[in-house]
Image: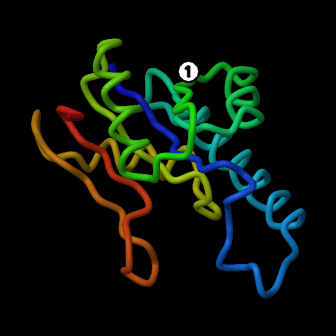
Amino acid sequence: MRVVLIAAKQLEFAKTRLAGAMPPAERQVLAEAMFRDVLGAAMNARAADHVALVSSDQRLLKMARAAGAMTIDEQFPRGLNAAVRLGTEALVAEGARTVCVVLSDIPLVTGADIDAVFAAIPGPRGVALVPSRELSGTNIIARTPPD
């Protein structure tokens, strides 16, 4: 089973680097809009059997369930790495063989982009990484096996 795992922090803690330019309510609206775009892209990815969300934000979890995605409630903010670990463990327990982790705020990502990441995994065991534009982080990582 191939799964796209979206990792999303609580909306109230999202986009904090924009604090000097946007008030909290506007940052939350922006983060939610970006999440909706990423969720839509993931749901349109043809290479994925399922889409899942790991988050402690109840509003995002509800949106994901309404779209037909699996949800993993992390209960409280744990940080990105711990949330991805929790989500991956839950998906492996459900039979996931490949997990493609996508951050919830990647602008302009498409289902075809996600499909290309799945296709880039080398062989039956491997990793495909998509670095951020400024090369300071990773926006998408796909692993098989996922753990």
Residue 98 x/y as whole percent: 28, 31
On screen, 13 above or below 45?
below
* Residue visible at 58% across and 56% down in the picture: 109
Image quarter where the N terminus lies is top left
Between 8 and 115, the one lying in front of the other is 8
Label 1: which secondary element: strand
In the picture, the quarter occupied by the C terminus is top left
Viewer-side residue, 71 vs 40:
71
| Total labels drawn | 1
**For the residue carrying disc 1, how many other residues have a C-alpha within 10 Å: few (<14), some (14-19), or many (20+)?**
some
Seen in the image, is 116 located left or right of residue 16?
A: left
In this picture, residue 88 sits left or right of residue 42: left
Question: What is the x, y in percent for residue 71?
Answer: 57, 24
Amino acid at the residue labelled 1: Met
Q: Residue furthest front?
A: 76
Colour treatment of the image: rainbow
Residue that badge 1 annotates: 70
Above or below, 3 against 8 in this view is above
What residue is at 89 percent from the left and 62 percent from the top? Answer: 25
Apparent side of residue 1 relative to residue 47 in the rendered image (left or right): left
**Can you give x and y, in whole percent of width and height, for residue 129 in the image?**
29, 59
The residue depicted at 75 percent of the width and 21 percent of the height is 66
The part of the image, by quadrant, that contains residue 61 is top right
Q: For residue 118, what is the image quadrant?
A: top left
At x 10%, y 38%, the residue is 125
Residue 13 coordinates in the image, percent (x, y):
68, 59
